[in-house]
């Protein structure tokens, strides 16, 4: 039995691509669950982080940025958002103060209007504006009463994150501990390994290429010496993309492999051997069976 007054529930983070949703999840968790790049649509799945605090348990859901689905992959990405909105107790709606600070109320009405639950307006990236601009910016927004709380923060610096946790907890109902204390997420190691590899590829490629890349972790084997051997394949859609990812004399794939290996070593806390190959799979983003293999499915 939990102590009296134990609070718990689901907190869904939504907002436009690139406002800093995944960065906030990582800041809350104090560890890297979601990959972050300067490119929109980096997050493709719903990512769950369980934050245990002395008075409760908060289950955060990071979501892909809201956008119009153009491919089947995008369609699944938007389904992940819908799923994350099926049963939250609090919604964190994030905007970027340095770019488009004000909420899109029509959008909120459409997506969460029917839920009748507290919505926080989280203004992220306050490090990018002058401090004295912040209050007038918030005061200049007429529909403030649409929000249960208005919280400015800088997710990348971790500034305001403790504050946010305090407020979220106040809005949580009494409830059980949904996850054991030592289970921080619902995805397996393989998922995070694939994501860390994809992050390095996304950081180093441009235009359409980062969006045409998927990573399939084909095997993860522990060796007797305590190290781990990983085989992973990049999927791309065209030969030209394969050329870019491999790079001249294999330089690109070698370089990103080094960085991915370091990141995976931090994740697994043991030496890692990483073998990467690139496969061309025409139109994989529209290919139902491939998407299913990669873990995207109808809900
Ligand atoms: N300056 C600044 N940049 C941030 C902050 N939070 C996130 N970013 C950057 O914004 C970009 C998008 O972040 P990400 O978390 O991937 O956004 P998402 O698409 O909403 O998940 C990345 O380059 C982050 O480093 C912040 O508080 N301040
Ligand atoms: Mg993200």
Image (cartoon, rainbow, N blue to C red):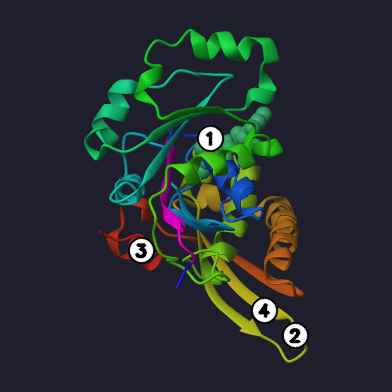
Was residue 4 drawn as part of the magenta stretch in this picture?
yes
Q: What stretch is highlighted in magenta?
A: 3-14
Q: In front here: 177 or 94?
A: 177
Tell me which numbered mark, 2 or 3, is placed earlier along the sequence.
2
The relative height of residue 100 versus residue 272 in the rendered view (above or below) is: above
Quickly name the residue at label 4: 229
Tell me which numbered mark, 3 or 1, is placed earlier along the sequence.
1
Query: Quarter of the image containing the C terminus?
Result: bottom left
Helix, strand or loop at disc 4?
strand
Tell me which numbered mark, 1 or 4, is placed earlier along the sequence.
1
Quickly name the residue at label 2: 226
Quickly name the residue at label 3: 290
Residue at 67% x, 37% y is: 156
Q: How far apart are marks 3 and 1 (CA)?
A: 23 Å
Helix, strand or loop at disc 1?
loop
Q: Residues within 10 Å of mark 1 (few under 14, many from 20)?
A: few
Asked if labels 4 and 2 touch by Cβ distance under 8 angstroms, the answer is no
Query: Quarter of the image containing the N terminus?
Result: bottom left
In front of the other: label 2 or label 3? 2
């Amino acid at each position: 039995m939990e102590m009296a007054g134990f609070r718990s529930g689901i907190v869904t983070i939504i907002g436009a691509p690139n406002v800093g949703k995944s960065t906030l999840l990582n800041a809350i968790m104090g560890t890297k669950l979601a990959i972050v790049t300067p490119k929109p649509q980096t997050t493709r799945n719903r990512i769950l982080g369980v934050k245990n605090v002395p008075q409760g348990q908060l289950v955060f859901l990071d979501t892909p940025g809201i956008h119009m689905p153009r491919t089947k992959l995008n369609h699944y990405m938007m389904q992940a958002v819908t799923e994350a909105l099926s049963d939250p107790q609090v919604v964190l709606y994030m905007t970027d103060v340095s770019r488009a600070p004000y909420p899109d109320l029509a959008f909120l009405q459409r997506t969460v209007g029917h839920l009748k639950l507290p919505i926080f307006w989280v203004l992220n990236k306050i490090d990018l504006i002058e401090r004295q601009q912040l209050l007038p910016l918030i005061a200049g927004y007429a529909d403030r009463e649409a929000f249960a709380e208005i919280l400015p923060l800088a997710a990348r610096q971790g500034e305001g994150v403790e504050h946010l946790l305090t407020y979220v907890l106040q809005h949580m109902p009494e409830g059980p501990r949904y996850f054991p204390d030592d289970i921080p997420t619902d995805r397996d190691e393989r998922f995070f390994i694939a994501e860390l590899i994809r992050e390095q590829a996304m950081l180093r490629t441009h235009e359409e290429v980062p969006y045409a890349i998927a990573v399939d972790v084909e095997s993860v084997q522990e060796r007797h010496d305590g190290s781990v051997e990983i085989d992973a394949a990049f999927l791309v859609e065209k030969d030209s993309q394969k050329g870019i990812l491999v790079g001249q004399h294999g330089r690109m794939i070698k370089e990103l492999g080094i960085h991915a290996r370091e990141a995976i070593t931090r994740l697994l806390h043991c030496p890692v051997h990483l073998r990467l190959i690139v496969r061309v799979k025409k139109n994989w983003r529209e290919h139902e069976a491939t998407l299913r293999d990669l873990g995207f499915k109808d809900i």
